[in-house]
Structures are given as structure tokens and as C-alpha cells.
Amino acid sequence: DTGVSQDPRHKITKRGQNVTFRCDPISEHNRLYWYRQTLGQGPEFLTYFQNEAQLEKSRLLSDRFSAERPKGSFSTLEIQRTEQGDSAMYLCASSPLDRGLYEQYFGPGTRLTVT
Amino acid sequence: AQKVTQAQTEISVVEKEDVTLDCVYETRDTTYYLFWYKQPPSGELVFLIRRNSFDEQNEISGRYSWNFQKSTSSFNFTITASQVVDSAVYFCALSEAFKDSNYQLIWGAGTKLIIKP
């Protein structure tokens, strides 16, 4: 399988709990992006990595959110003390360095429900 | 500020009809990129096309065609002879430059396209 994979696909958690999502990009892609998508809306940019360096973070990414890409391969997105407003689809995308933003390849997403 | 507007929330047509999805954008950049993505019910966003601001030629790919007009800041998407498999949410997006010359996508709200058999 050469696509972007995300795990888990679905997560139900209680308010106040911590959750962690994983993204495995296409192996030769240097860039990795996280987005959040709520129902009826387009994706909202959260953060972006080039290799292991986190180069940009959105204002949407409060201090409860943290993302890592320790070895420049897979990435994790952690949400601490989840709130009901965090319920959304969390999308990961990757792209090769030489094509920049031009074509981002998306994973299937992780749907988070906070009860 | 950059913005993408997809005024059509939902479109429903009968199979084999042609359908056009509208996209209007706002940007102060002179260099920018426009994109269309498809999101089928499975949820995975699929890249369809990228167009840069210097290339106003229309593009055709099979049953899909795109009409880019800078004068009206529009980048419309037409599906001819629609098929049930075209049913999906379609997103238009605009690139915005990061401070280090990498680009962030600004997304429209999407248009849900329903093709009835």
C-alpha cells in the first residue's frame, strides 16, 4: 500500500480525556500536513512538517494540541483534555519536497467524537 | 485576505446531465494556485487539478473540464455526462504563501453533488 494511512479511523472519547492519532505518509514524501474538517466545511489547516521540523502552526492549534514527527516519517497528533468542540475529522496529507503544495495526498482521516 | 466561496451547497442532477460547480476566490497575491479536490463518501480527499495564476487556459480531462477566469476570479468545474460515481463533495482551494515560501491551502466549504440514476 503506497497511500497515506491514518490510525485509528474512528475514536470515541469522553470529554477531558487525551487522544493520540497517527499518520503514516507516502514513504518518499518529505512534507506532512494535518487538517481538521467539521461537517459541511472544508479542511482547516492545523500544522505542517518538512521532514522532522514543524514549520507552521495554525492559530487553531491551541496549547492542548501537539504534533510530532520525530524521525521525519510518521507523525502523531495529540489532543489533551478533549472538549466537545474537538469533535471533527482529522486529516493527514503528504507531498514530495520538489512539488511543494502542488499535490497533497490525503489519508482517509480519523473521525473523533467527544462525548 | 484569501477566501474561497462555493455558493452551491448541494446540487442534484439526473445521470447523464452536465453540471457545473462554481468557485469564486479572493486573493491579493499575484502568484497563486487553484485546486479542485473530490471527497467521496469514503472520506478520502482526491486531488483533481491544480492551476497556476499565469495559466488561464481551460483544461479538459475526460468528462471533466475547468474554466479559469481571472477577470471574474472564478475557477469553475464542469462534469459532462455525469455518472452516479461522480457523487461526492467537491472542494475548491486556493494556495496562500507561507512566510518561508511554502504554501497553505485555503478551502471552500464544498459542494455536495448528488447524481441520481
Image: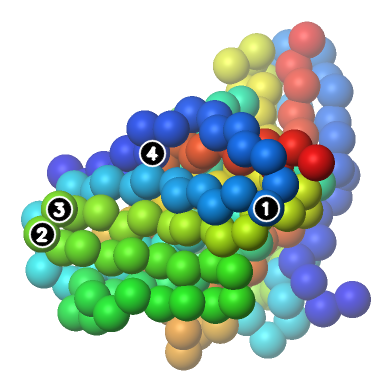
- Residue at mark 2: B71
**Left or right relative to B81: residue A3:** right
Using the image, determine if residue A51 lies above or below residue A106: below
Amino acid type indicated by mark 3: Thr
**Left or right relative to B43: residue A12:** right
| Whether marks 3 and 2 lie on the same chain | yes
On what subunit does the disc labeled 2 rest? B
Question: Which of the pair B29/A79 is nearer the observer?
Answer: B29
Q: Provide the secondary structure element on which disc 3 rests.
A: helix
Asked if one can make out residue A56 in the rendered structure from this viewpoint, the answer is no
What is the number of the mark on residue B16? 1
Q: Locate residue A60: give its quadrant.
A: top left
Residue shown at 61%/26% (left/top)?
A39
Residue shown at 67%/53% (left/top)?
B16
Amino acid type indicated by mark 1: Lys
Q: CA–CA distance between discs 2 and 4? A: 17 Å
Give the mark, 1 or 4, whose residue is nearer the N terminus.
4
- Residue at mark 3: B72
Q: Provide the secondary structure element on which disc 2 rests.
A: helix
What is the number of the mark on residue A60? none
Image coords of residue A63 (percent x, y): 49, 32
Foreground mark, 2 or 1, reads 1
Q: Provide the secondary structure element on which disc 4 rests.
A: loop
Amino acid type indicated by mark 2: Ser
Q: Are marks 1 and 3 in contact (CB under 8 Å)?
A: no
Give the mark, 2 or 1, whose residue is nearer the N terminus.
1
Q: Are marks 3 and 4 in contact (CB under 8 Å)?
A: no
Q: Residues within 10 Å of mark 1 (few under 14, many from 20)?
A: some
Q: Residues within 10 Å of mark 4 (few under 14, many from 20)?
A: many
